[in-house]
Amino acid sequence: MIRWLFAALAAAAAALCGAALWLRLTPVSVDAYHRMGTEQHAEGDWRDGEGFEAVRQVPAPRATLQELVKIAGASAGTTLLEGTAEEGLVTFVTRSPLLGLPEITNLWIEGNRIHLRGHAAVLDFGLGVEASRAEDRIRQWMSRAGLQ
């Protein structure tokens, strides 16, 4: 009886480890995430159940985007997925500290506004944790770039 219990526990632990490994190693699709947001927000901060978006009007959007790209690229756990400041759309993947879950941050230019939108790529439980992490990351990057 105890052997069956240990076998069941071992199988459950192996399944959890396998799922965590799969989540950590699964590549992030450029086609699915390298895009501008679907809603056109005015200047301000916008939070929903899926993520966080900050929109700022800036005098030099391309230069501001270039600075944000440098800052994001130097952030721990963050890698460039696709795009350049010259294109006006850049997508980064930041892995969560514990499980390495991918979180997406899109930066793009619309007129004289710059948008920064962050959200989870997988396992968005709708509890606001992913949106909070995205908001913290975006606010840090904006602060380093001198944006309020």
Image (cartoon, rainbow, N blue to C red):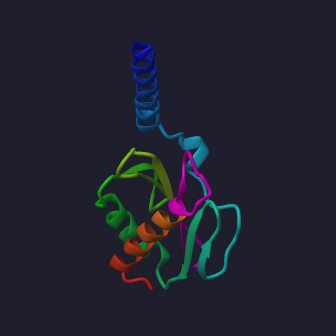
Q: Residue furthest front?
A: 1
Residue 65 image offset from top left, x and y in percent = 44, 69
Q: Can residue 99 be seen in this view?
A: yes
**What residue do we see at 49% from left, 85% from top?**
59
Q: Which of 139 and 18 is in front in this view?
A: 18
Q: Is residue 118 above or below residue 79?
A: below
**What residue do we see at 65% from left, 67% from top?**
48
Residue 50 image offset from top left, x and y in percent = 62, 60
Q: Which of 106 and 119 is in front in this view?
A: 119
**What residue do we see at 39% from left, 20% from top?**
6
Q: Which quadrant of the figure contains the N terminus?
A: top left
Residue 33 image offset from top left, x and y in percent = 57, 48
Give the residues in magenta.
106-130
Based on the picture, tell me whether residue 1 belongs to the magenta stretch.
no
Q: Which quadrant of the figure contains the C terminus?
A: bottom left
How many marks the image carries: the answer is 0
Q: In this view, does 99 lie above or below 68?
A: above
Q: Is residue 2 above or below residue 143?
A: above
Q: Is residue 88 visible?
A: no
Q: Nearer the viewer, residue 106 or 128?
A: 128
Residue 144 image offset from top left, x and y in percent = 33, 77
Based on the picture, tell me whether residue 120 belongs to the magenta stretch.
yes
Q: Quadrant of residue 10?
A: top left
